[in-house]
Amino acid sequence: MWNIEEIKKDVKNNLSDYRYNHSLRVMEEAERLAKHYKADIEKCMLCGLTHDMCKEFTDKENEEFIKKYNLPKELLNPENKNIIHGYTASILVKEKYNFTEDMVLAIRYHTTGYPNMDLLAKIVYLADKIEKGKDYPGIEEERLLAYQNIDKAIILCLNNQIKHLKEKHKVINKMGYETLKSLEDATTN
Ligand SMILES: [Fe+2]
């Protein structure tokens, strides 16, 4: 069984310093959020630490990984370019570290969330967006809301993401819209 220090070393070995430092900050933010919302602190930290561990795969490595684990080939399509690393990491953390199913899901969909996500997934999603090294328009409001109303904070993050992508003439993966709808339904009922 791996402990957090061993996993830290393993993640460090697989990432650039830039992304490893981001991963550490996501882990720390996930810890703060977990304490605030009384979630499972260790699970939140471990997911924060490992969520990007496949983000530096080359196209070839992605292709090989998809083949090896028999994953949907659509993951290699351009519209999934920003979400494939969550999917591949979710397979690896299960295989390598024996992470539980809720951790697998939180990591798999950390870029867009997913409909009816649990508290762990919400924390991992948000920690990735608001960790201390990030700076983009609207982030201060997201940081404030993150500790007041987690659902509304995610709605804000998703809307900001959509706006930002639109400005770059890109669109968010359809899963992002599904998450948004699910959270909007939950918060207005
Ligand atoms: Fe990340």
Image (spheres, rainbow, N blue to C red):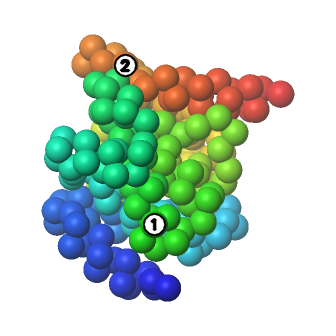
Q: Which residue is mark 1?
A: 95
Report the mark closest to the observer, 2 or 1: 1
Is 130 in front, or is 73?
73
Is 106 in front, or is 25?
106
* Measured Cα–Cα span from mark 2 to mark 1: 32 Å
| Kind of residue at badge 1 | Glu
Q: Is mark 2 within 8 Å of ligand 1?
A: no
The percent coordinates of residue 121 (x first, y second) are 58, 51
Q: Is residue 43 visible?
A: yes
Q: Residues within 10 Å of mark 2 (few under 14, many from 20)?
A: some
Residue for point 38% across, 38% down: 83
The percent coordinates of residue 148 (x first, y second) are 64, 49
Q: Quadrant of the C terminus?
A: top right
Task: Specify whether 152 is left or right of 49.
Answer: right
Task: Specify whether 174 is left or right of 82.
Answer: right
The percent coordinates of residue 14 (x first, y second) are 22, 66
Q: Which residue is mark 2?
A: 171
Quarter of the figure with residue 17: bottom left
Task: Specify whether 118 is left or right of 153.
Answer: right
Task: Specify whether 82 is left or right of 33.
Answer: left
What SS does tag 1 mark? helix
Is 16 in front, or is 132?
16
Is 55 in front, or is 128?
55
Tell whether label 1 touches label 2 (CB within 8 Å): no
| Kind of residue at badge 2 | Val
Q: Residues within 10 Å of mark 1 (few under 14, many from 20)?
A: few
> Compared to 40, does 139 lie above or below?
above
What SS does tag 2 mark? loop
Q: Earlier in the sequence, mark 2 or mark 1?
A: 1
Circle number at residue 182: none
